[in-house]
Each structure stands twice: as structure tokens, then as C-alpha cells.
């Protein structure tokens, strides 16, 4: 509430005294007049409000409140809540019969609250705060009398959804109640950020923009839950991190919102508990992260990014960089222009001398290019080798002696394995599997490749058409082992515009660890292999969400060896934003 000392002088004087000054006599204000009321306010009044944190509670259920009536509260970002107003209309004064919802952040200018759903906004707009849909009730559902700020007779009201404007009000001289479902974002369009402690005030105004006088203004203070990243996952990604620097800092690559699909690097310095963007003022210009992968060399995260117009290289320097840490080093450098592929795909590997090997899609085939240690990209080379359907879904891993291992799919339901030698030559293709799906959404049926340095073997994991994961191992000579089943549960495929299997794999010592999303439930599971390649029964890691993406890396937290499999997963964005979270699978010591 605004303190008296800060109010306009007109609100502190009896209207009769003002009448002597302004030539308009009037009676003194009564106790029914709300603080802050002036001639610019609406004749209708807000008499009470209450914030409901349980978005799933029924419209007229008396439960799930975040606090008592007329009490401001603290709520997490990226978690929809509801705001309920009680309104009293005047008996004999003229007024406009529709109200709109406004907000202001940290005492700034009042702005309309737009309608934009959560987590996916078909309006292609992601504002700081918005009105969202309400699964618990239909738009314009009848609202009962729950609040007790007015003694006037109750004449109804409505629950609003996906609209900042309410319907026509009931008769004059009565009270009504109005509920809006809202969400406060972590990141919004323009990559603007809502920080912990930001204050969001809400008010009703009539169609003339006049605010309703109120005894108290609703205020929600934003909090950021531990391990929340927010933002949006890149579509069809290779490895994204979280990449760990020697000081324990973690870095992850994502977009702030599906409606502002620019590349951003977010960082955590406390083991994944809190995240924020670094060097956002200098992020790359190109957006639309479809076909995106990264690799690390000497303190720099290198990224390969395919868009319709071509293939781009970006690079970000971590705290391990000796001169300019936490800064973008390369932005929007063109690697090749192979033409638009059916599905944007990319994978990249960093070799020990600082050179890069990048694989990406073309209209018919995959191509690869090599960047020299000095920073020059060579000509693109086709990945051909016999007749067959278009190739896609590449995954890379660097092995011994800077040999780069490559696996990819074809539209005929087969998966293939090759190697790119240190001199850039490509070995002949070997068929890994012939039982993959054949739809466009199945092109990404191969998981990120895993190389085991202790045995100089490369593990190729893939999803069959029946949904199960299988694995084969390539030895130092490129010979493939027989296939071994990894999961009995069917694994999700293309859960959110991904054209890719919902699973990830990393090496931890001599073991391969796999995280996968069960197709039927969206639950996230973990399994691991032993040294002989046998797989343990899967254990559930997250069973309270509809997971849709997962990517991870080993993390050591400043120790000499990995202590956990750190991963970022999408908890059910459906292609929207705000649902990325960090978690870990602890490493089991022998």
C-alpha cells in the first residue's frame, strides 16, 4: 500500500476543503472510500483479493491458497497461480462494465497483462507475466462468493482464462468475484530476466484505464526454485553439457523462450542450484536452434548450429580460458551452405590439437567439414558410400589418436558406423542395425556416442522401431560386437518436435550410463553397463513429470574424478519454455 506521505496532496485533504479551493463543494470522505481514490479512479471498487498457489484447485474450492485474504505472497517463477478479486459496483454512479488486468514490476510503469499460455504459447509471445489457460475450469465459468471484503449482495462473477479482459459485470450496487490464472516467467522475449525478489503488483482497471480503488494491492514476489534453468531446449540436439570448468562452474546451452529462440549460455557456480545467463549482451545473432551440438577444448565450448541458410560455428570461453573468461569468442561464423535438409542436424567433435570435426545435414546426404587449429574451416565433404535413402541423425565421439567415430541413420530404418581418421579420410560404412523406425521423426534414433578410453572401444546405442534401446561396441579395429538389449521399456521418440530419441549416454570410467524417457509415462529412468557390457535394471529418477528432453555430462565438483552424472531435462514443455531443470545421478563407488 502506498504510504500517506507519498500520495498526491488531493488524496490527503477532505473534499469539502478542496471544494473551497477548486470551487466544487463536497462532503468529507467516509470510511468506505479506499485509500488513493481520486477523480481518475473507476467508480467501481476492488474490496478484496486472494492469491491461490494451487493451480489445479477447482474455481470455487476453498483450498490451495498461498496466503490469507488481502495478503501479498512469494511464489516461484514458471509455476502458474491464480489471483481472485472481489469487486463492488456503485449503485448510482456511472461506470464502464468491463475490467482489464494490469501489472507493474518493481514499482515501474503499469502495463496490461497479456494472454500467453504456459508452457507453450501459441501466440508466439512470451511476456514477463501473462494470463494462461486454466485446466481446472472453463473460460467464463461461474464464480462463487469466496471472499468477504464486501457486504453487498452477491451477483456472480467469472473465472477468466487466456484473456486479460473480463466479461460484462452484473447489476449496480452488488459484489462479484473474478479469477485470473497467471504465470511469472524466468526468461521472456528479448531474454529479459525476472530475478529472485522481483515484485509484481496487479490491479484492475476499467476500459477507460481508470484503476479500481482498493484497500490493498495484490503483490507477488518472485522466487527461483533450486535447480531451475527455465528457457527452452534446442531441437534435435547433440551434446549440450552441462560442461564443467576446472573450478566446478557448469555451463549449459539453450534458448530463453520458444518465441525468442536465440542462443544463450547459462552458468551455475553452486553445483547446479542456481543458473543465470553470462555475456548475454554479446550472444550470437542467429536463432532457431534446430540441429545443434557442442564440444569442449581448452576452456572453450565450440558449437555447431544448422539453420536453413547454412551451418554456423559459435564458441564460448569458460572460466578455464586464461585471458577472456565467460565471454563469447566466435559468433555466427559460416561453416558451409549445403542447402536445407529435411531435418536440421549437427554434431561436432574437438580433437586434441584444437581442430574440430563437424557433421551436418544436406538435402540428400550428410556432409562433414574440418576446422584447423588456426580457425579455418575446410571444404565440405559428402558422407556417401553406396546407394540408399537420405542420411541423417549424426552423432560423433572423439576416440584414441584423434580418430572421430561417427554413427548415423538412413530413412530405410538402418543405422551405420564409420570413422573419420586424423588425416580427414572416411572409412567404409558398417551397418549397425536394420530395425529402426522409418518415419521422418525417427531420423535421430542414435544416441550420443560414448568412447571408453580404458578399452579403446566406442559404444553405439540406438532405438529400435519397437521403442527399446540396444547397444553395440566397436573395438580399436572397428569390429562390432553383437547387439545387446539395454532397456525393456519403450523409450520416447520425438517427444517435442525433436525427431530424436529421448535418451542420453555418457562414459564414467569403464561404465556407460544412460538416461532415458519412458514412452508411456514420460518418467525419466537411469541404467548403466558393467565392464563386460551387461546392463543393470533401470531405476526411476524422476516420476512426477512428463519429461521430453535430456542431455548430460560427468561432473566432478572440483574432485579428481567424476562424482555424478549431471543432466538437464525438460519436464514437459511441449515445445514451449520454462521447464528445464538440473539434476544428478550420483556415481556409485566400487
Image (spheres, rainbow, N blue to C red):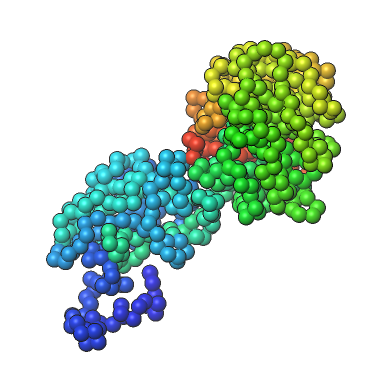
Identity of the residue furthest to the bottom in this view: 20
Report the front residue among 548 and 271: 548
Image quadrant of residue 485?
top right
Position in image of residue 143 (x %, y %): 25, 48
Image quadrant of residue 9?
bottom left
Image quadrant of residue 568?
top right
Position in image of residue 578 (x %, y %): 51, 44
Q: Using the image, determine if residue 576 lies above or below residue 458.
A: below
Residue 195 seen in the current view: yes
Position in image of residue 470 (x %, y %): 65, 18
Report the front residue among 357 and 386: 386
Q: What residue lies at 75% left-to-right and 40% top-to-bottom?
A: 296
Report the front residue among 54 and 125: 125
Image-based side of 339 in relation to 325, left or right: left
Q: Using the image, determine if residue 545 lies above or below residue 415.
A: below
Q: What residue lies at 28% left-to-right and 70% top-to-bottom?
A: 40
Position in image of residue 223 (x %, y %): 51, 55
Q: What residue lies at 49% left-to-right and 33% top-to-bottom?
A: 546
Identity of the residue furthest to the left in this view: 92
Image-based side of 145 in relation to 248, left or right: left
Question: Looking at the rendering, in which quadrant would you find the N terminus?
Answer: bottom left
Q: What residue lies at 45% left-to-right and 65% top-to-bottom?
A: 108
Residue 294 seen in the current view: no
Question: Looking at the rendering, in which quadrant would you find the C terminus?
Answer: top right
Amino acid at each position: 500500500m502506498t504510504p500517506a506521505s507519498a500520495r498526491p496532496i488531493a488524496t490527503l485533504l477532505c473534499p469539502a476543503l478542496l471544494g473551497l479551493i477548486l470551487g466544487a463543494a463536497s462532503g468529507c470522505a467516509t470510511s468506505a472510500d479506499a485509500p488513493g481514490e481520486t477523480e481518475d479512479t473507476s467508480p467501481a471498487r476492488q474490496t478484496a483479493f486472494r492469491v491461490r498457489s494451487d493451480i489445479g484447485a477447482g474455481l470455487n474450492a476453498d483450498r490451495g491458497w498461498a496466503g490469507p485474504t488481502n495478503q501479498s505472497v512469494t511464489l516461484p517463477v514458471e509455476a502458474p497461480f491464480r489471483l481472485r478479486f472481489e469487486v463492488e459496483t456503485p449503485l448510482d454512479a456511472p461506470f464502464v462494465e468491463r475490467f482489464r488486468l494490469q501489472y507493474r514490476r518493481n514499482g515501474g510503469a503499469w502495463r496490461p497483462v497479456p494472454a500467453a499460455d504456459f508452457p507453450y504459447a501459441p501466440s508466439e509471445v512470451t511476456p514477463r507475466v501473462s494470463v494462461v489457460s486454466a485446466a481446472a475450469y472453463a473460460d467464463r465459468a461461474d464464480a462463487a462468493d469466496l471472499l468477504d471484503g464486501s457486504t453487498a449482495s452477491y451477483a456472480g462473477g467469472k473465472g477468466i482464462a487466456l484473456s486479460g479482459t473480463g466479461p460484462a459485470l452484473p447489476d449496480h450496487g452488488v459484489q462479484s468475484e473474478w479469477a485470473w490464472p497467471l504465470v511469472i516467467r524466468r526468461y521472456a522475449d528479448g531474454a529479459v530476466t525476472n530475478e529472485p525478489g522481483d515484485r509484481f503488483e496487479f490491479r484492475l482497471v476499467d476500459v477507460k484505464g481508470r484503476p479500481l480503488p482498493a484497500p490493498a494491492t495484490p503483490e507477488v514476489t518472485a522466487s527461483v526454485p533450486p535447480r531451475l534453468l527455465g528457457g527452452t531446449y534446442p531441437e534435435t540436439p547433440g551434446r549440450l553439457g552441462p560442461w564443467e570448468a576446472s573450478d566446478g562452474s557448469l555451463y549449459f546451452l539453450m534458448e530463453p523462450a520458444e518465441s525468442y529462440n536465440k542462443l544463450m549460455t547459462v552458468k551455475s557456480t553452486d553445483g547446479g542450484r542456481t543458473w543465470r545467463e553470462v555475456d548475454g549482451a554479446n550472444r550470437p545473432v542467429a536463432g532457431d536452434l534446430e540441429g545443434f551440438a557442442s564440444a569442449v577444448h581448452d576452456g572453450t565450448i565450440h558449437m555447431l548450429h544448422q539453420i536453413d541458410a547454412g551451418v554456423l560455428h559459435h564458441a564460448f570461453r569458460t572460466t578455464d580460458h586464461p585471458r577472456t573468461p565467460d565471454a563469447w569468442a566466435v559468433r555466427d561464423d559460416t561453416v558451409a551452405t549445403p542447402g536445407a535438409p529435411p531435418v536440421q542436424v549437427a554434431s561436432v567433435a574437438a580433437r586434441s590439437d584444437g581442430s574440430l570435426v563437424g557433421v551436418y545435414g544436406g538435402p540428400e546426404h550428410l556432409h562433414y567439414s574440418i576446422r584447423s587449429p588456426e580457425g579455418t574451416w575446410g571444404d565440405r565433404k559428402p558422407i556417401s558410400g553406396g546407394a540408399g535413402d537420405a542420411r541423417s541423425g549424426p552423432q560423433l565421439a572423439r576416440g584414441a589418436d584423434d580418430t572421430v567415430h561417427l554413427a548415423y541413420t538412413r530413412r530405410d530404418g538402418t543405422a551405420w558406423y564409420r570413422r573419420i581418421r586424423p588425416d580427414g579420410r572416411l572409412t567404409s560404412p558398417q551397418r549397425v542395425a536394420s530395425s529402426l523406425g522409418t518415419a521422418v521423426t525417427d531420423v535421430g534414433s542414435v544416441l550420443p556416442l560414448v568412447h571408453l578410453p580404458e578399452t579403446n572401444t566406442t559404444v553405439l546405442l540406438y532405438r529400435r522401431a519397437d521403442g527399446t534401446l540396444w547397444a553395440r561396441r566397436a573395438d580399436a579395429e572397428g569390429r562390432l560386437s553383437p547387439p545387446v538389449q539395454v532397456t525393456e521399456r519403450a523409450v520416447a521418440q520425438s517427444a517435442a518436435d525433436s525427431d530424436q530419441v529421448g535418451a542420453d549416454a555418457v562414459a564414467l570410467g569403464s561404465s556407460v550410463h544412460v538416461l532415458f524417457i519412458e514412452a508411456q509415462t514420460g518418467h525419466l529412468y537411469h541404467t548403466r553397463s558393467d565392464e563386460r557390457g551387461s546392463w543393470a535394471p533401470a531405476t526411476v529418477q524422476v516420476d512426477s513429470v512428463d519429461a521430453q528432453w535430456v542431455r548430460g555430462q560427468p561432473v566432478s565438483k572440483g574432485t579428481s574424478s567424476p562424482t555424478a552424472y549431471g543432466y538437464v531435462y525438460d519436464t514437459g514443455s511441449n515445445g514451449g519454455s520454462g521447464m528445464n531443470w538440473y539434476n544428478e545421478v550420483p556415481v556409485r563407488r566400487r
